[in-house]
Amino acid sequence: MCGIVGYTGVREAYPILIKGLHRLEYRGYDSAGVALMGEQDDALKVYKAAGRVSDLEAAAAPNDCSGTAGIAHTRWATHGVPNGINAHPHVSQSGNLSLVHNGIIENYATLRDQLKSKGFTFKSETDTEVLVQLIEYVEQSRHLSLPEAVRIALSRVIGAYAIIVMDRRHPGVLVAARKSSPMVIGLGEGNCEFFIASDASPIVEYTRRMVYLNDEEMAVCKPGEELNVVTLGNDAVNPDVKHVELDLDMLEKGGYPHFMLKEIFEQPQCLRDAMRGRLLTHHKRVVLSAVSDHREQLVEARRFIFVSCGTSWHASLIGKQLIERFCRIPCQVEYASEFRYANPVILPGDVVVAISQSGETADTLAAIQLAKKAGAIIFGIVNSVGSSIARLSDTGTYIHVGPEIGVASTKAFTGQLVILTLLALAIGYERGSIDKGTYEKLIQELDVIPEKMEKVLSQNERIKEVADRYCGIRNALYLGRGINYPVALEGALKLKEISYIHAEGYPAAEMKHGPIALIDENMPVVFIATHQNEYEKAISNMQEVVARKGRILAIVTEGDTVIRQFADNVIEIPDTEECLVPVLSVIPLQLLAYHVAVGNGLNVDQPRNLAKSVTVE
Ligand code: AGP
């Protein structure tokens, strides 16, 4: 997820673009760039820098930043590490075109090879540079106008994009188009100026008249002329001009009161992004480049060792169950902070899987440094492209859920679970340890998980009502069995870290070995009891709690008629394959923790004592 901004009109573009990038830094902040166009047919002025927008300002400051049209970008890397070369805008071979892009071009490698055969060369590792070169190729080879070249070129692209393109030979003209990534166009008075951005936050201080471009639409912005919008099929579109009322703070959070709630609701789209180009439903295949590039090491592995912390450690526990179930490879899960000092036995051929949202967690980094020295293969499952853990890994798979701003991890967790499922399926397929029927059934189910997740999210108001009854609690027990046991741990962690209530996750069957002494009418118990192998056992465990006056909030499978007979509160989730239940069963627990914390007036996005990335021991 990146932030893009464009301006064309009567004012100096640079200040508007830079201010707009600052408003969009929540969308990505590993590198940034700006391209400015003068009022004559003169060279583009392009300034780029690794790091934050402030680093770009420092890089651009000594230079000529004049011009009344320009485009700018703050990056969340997907292809190519964060540096000045990979930063946007990208410029075409002739130097005429420059382009900024938010999204992922899935077929960029094929397009790049085709363009190389036509004599194009590339400076960066990005999919975006392929796009600007493709537009130039179409424009040159077919002698088309810029808008026509953009339209034709995009018809050959597979993936997600929100782009702004400009051509120095056409001063003041910006061409914008989108598919699956957001884009808003602000209309200045009398069409004297246009503002383009990933969302309304960089625009709202200049104009509240906005057009939200729809998928596969393209707009041409030229001061003094009406906004011209067409479909990529070249059908005219009558733009729907809206009057945006939201204030700036709400806009940066996508209209949500907190980043955490925004990120909870982003999860269905994040899972689609995480699976894009990897879950090939029509081909009934899972394709992970990390597995094809390191097939023998992964498929022949004698052991997987997961090292991670916090929420990522909970994801690791589920990863263990997935790999052992579908690949029959023994796994162990270690707290990275313990592993790094345990003088662990690491055998040649061991695969050490490092799971980390930030990619900078000191304990996890130290753990893989130790494992690497001992000869293990390091497989990284990371969100932040180019982060330390990603760079130290021998191979791996990015989760592509975009920046996670809320300190309490939500979308990264479900993104990790989906990637772990894809990994288990890909390796299991290569090992022949998963039957074809199961493999294809899980592929189909993964494809519909985002919409099943949307169904759970639609219960937000109901979950808030339940949460309001829990605001006064001081303790809580979270219980689950099998694949839901790590979900119980994760749910307890969410409540702990944002509401400061002591909450403990436990394997449900383990209750009778001591913790059941805690149960009385003052000990709320959150029980994840979905329809799966140990369902009847879970019922028995719940009865043990009820017999001691415990109050139960149960997360159950849609249509369950048994548990609601004795649970105090019930939240239903759609049925799914057992290995995918955690992706859905964690959602009510995220929302429960969120609403309890908000109900108690706490700072949900920046809880006390916590940091988003623990880069120290
Ligand atoms: C999760 O909500 C916490 N913020 C924390 O436990 C986090 O998961 C842990 O610090 C690991 O971070 P990482 O995934 O970036 O390595």
Image (spheres, helix red, strand yellow):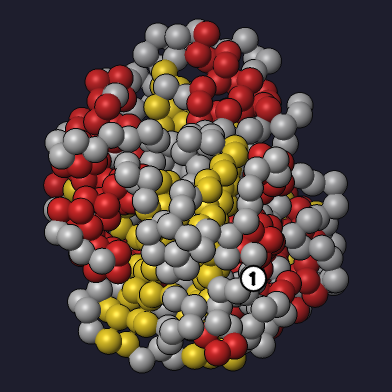
Could you tell me which secondary element the residue under label 1 belongs to?
A: loop
Q: Residue at x 54, y 55 (%)?
A: 36
The percent position of residue 334, horizontal first and vertical second, equals 58, 28
Q: Residue at x 55, y 28 (%)?
A: 389
Q: Is residue 538 visible?
A: no
The percent position of residue 411, horizontal first and vertical second, equals 54, 56
Q: Residue at x 76, y 53 (%)?
A: 497
- Amino acid type of the residue that numbered disc 1 sits on in the rendered structure: Arg
Q: Is residue 67 visible?
A: yes
Instruction: Say if 121 sits above or below 218 in the image.
Output: above
The percent position of residue 551, horizontal first and vertical second, equals 70, 71
Instruction: Say if 246 sits above or below 147 in the image.
Output: below
Name the residue nearer the viewer: 235 or 347: 235
Find residue 525 and report its image quarter: bottom right
Name the residue nearer the viewer: 514 or 79: 79
Neighbor class of circle 1 (other Cα within 10 Å; few <14, some 14-19, many 20+) is some
Find residue 527 and report its image quarter: bottom right
The percent position of residue 5, horizontal first and vertical second, equals 55, 63
Name the residue nearer the viewer: 568 or 395: 395
Name the residue nearer the viewer: 390 or 364: 390
> In the rendered view, does 217 fall on the left or right side of 506?
left
Q: Residue at x 44, y 14 (%)?
A: 376
Instruction: Say if 121 sits above or below 63 in the image.
Output: above
* Residue to which mark 1 is pinned: 11
Numbered marks: total: 1
